[in-house]
C-alpha cells in the first residue's frame, strides 16, 4: 500500500507544474479573475443629523472586480491515505492540498449613501477598495486510481476549502456630509468580506481547481 501511495505522490509532484498552469487557466476562463460581481445589497449603517431631523443613513453597496485569484499556486497536493479494493484493481483514499495566492486580492467598492426626511434627501457616492493580503488555501478531498500494467491516477476531487489571510484592509474615500459614518461603513464592509465574500471565494475556487485536475488526469506511472 505504501508503495502505491508513494508512487502516486511522486506522480502528482511531477505534474504539479502542469496542474498549476491548468488552475490559472481555469480561474481565468471561469470569470474569476477578475470576478465582476462579488457582493451587493443595502443596509442601514447609522443615522445623520439633517437639522430638521435625524435620518437613517442607508448604504447601497457593490463589491466588484475581484482581482488576484489567478495567482493561486498549489505548493503541495499529497495523498494522505489509500485503500485497495478487494480485487486489488482500484485504489481510493484521501488527499490534502496546500496553496497560496501570491498576489494580494483586490476588490473595488462602489455604491451610494442616502438619507432623507421631508424635502431633504442628500446622497453621496461610495468609492474605495479592499485589499486582502497573505492569502492561503487549505483543502481536503479524495482520489481514485486503477492498478494494472501501470498505476493510473484517474481522479482527484478537492473539497472543503478553507481560505486564510494575513490582513484585510478597507479604504473608503471621504463621504462628504456622511463622513461621520466612514468608519462604521468600513467596519461593515470588513465584516462582509470576512464572512460572505470569503465564502464566495472558497466556493468559486473549488470547481476551478477540480476542473483543472480533470483536464490533467488521468496520469499513469510504471509499477
Image: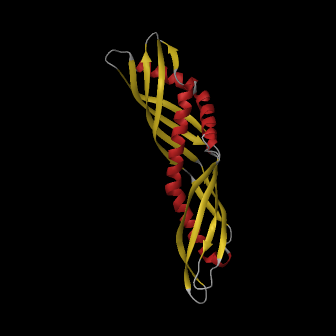
Please name the residue shown 58% across and 28% down the image: 16
Residue at image x 68%, y 67%?
173
Q: Is residue 106 visible?
A: no
Colouring mode (rainbow / by chain / secondary structure / one colour): secondary structure
- Please name the residue shown 58% across and 41% down the image: 100
State the residue at coordinates (63%, 32%): 21
- Above-or-below relation of 6 to 69: above
Q: Position of residue 164 (x, y in %)?
A: 52, 48
Q: Quarter of the image holding residue 144? A: top left
Indicate whether 50 appears above or below 183. Answer: below
Q: Is residue 168 visible to the viewer in this orientation of the structure?
A: yes
Q: Is residue 14 left or right of residue 144?
A: right
Q: Residue furthest bottom?
A: 52
**Residue 160 x %, y %:** 44, 42
Which image quadrant for residue 146? top left
Residue at the far top: name it. Answer: 149
Taking depth in this image into account, of 173 and 40 the one nearest to the observer is 40
Specify whether 35 is left or right of 192: right
Q: Residue furthest left?
A: 86
From the top left corner, tell me how far across and down residue 23 is, in percent. 59, 35
| Residue 192 position in % (x across, y down) | 52, 60
Quadrant that contains the N terminus: top left
Amino acid at each position: 500500500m505504501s508503495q502505491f501511495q508513494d508512487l502516486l505522490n511522486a506522480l502528482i509532484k511531477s505534474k504539479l507544474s502542469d496542474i498549476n498552469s491548468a488552475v490559472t487557466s481555469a480561474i481565468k476562463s471561469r470569470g474569476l479573475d477578475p470576478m465582476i460581481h462579488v457582493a451587493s445589497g443595502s443596509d442601514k449603517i447609522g443615522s445623520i443629523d439633517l437639522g430638521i431631523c435625524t435620518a437613517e443613513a442607508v448604504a447601497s453597496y457593490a463589491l466588484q472586480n475581484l482581482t488576484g485569484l489567478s495567482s493561486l499556486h498549489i505548493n503541495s497536493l499529497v495523498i494522505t491515505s489509500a485503500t485497495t479494493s478487494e480485487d486489488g484493481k482500484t485504489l481510493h483514499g484521501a488527499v490534502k492540498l496546500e496553496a497560496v495566492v501570491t498576489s494580494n486580492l483586490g476588490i473595488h467598492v462602489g455604491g451610494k449613501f442616502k438619507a432623507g426626511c421631508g424635502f431633504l434627501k442628500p446622497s453621496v457616492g461610495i468609492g474605495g477598495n479592499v485589499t486582502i493580503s497573505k492569502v492561503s488555501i487549505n483543502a481536503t478531498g479524495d482520489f481514485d486510481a486503477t492498478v494494472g500494467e501501470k498505476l493510473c491516477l484517474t481522479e482527484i476531487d478537492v473539497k472543503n476549502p478553507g481560505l486564510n489571510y494575513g490582513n484585510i484592509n478597507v479604504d473608503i474615500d471621504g463621504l462628504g456630509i456622511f463622513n461621520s459614518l466612514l468608519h462604521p461603513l468600513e467596519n461593515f464592509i470588513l465584516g462582509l468580506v470576512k464572512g460572505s465574500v470569503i465564502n464566495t471565494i472558497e466556493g468559486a475556487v473549488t470547481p476551478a481547481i477540480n476542473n483543472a485536475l480533470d483536464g490533467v488526469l488521468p496520469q499513469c506511472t510504471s509499477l
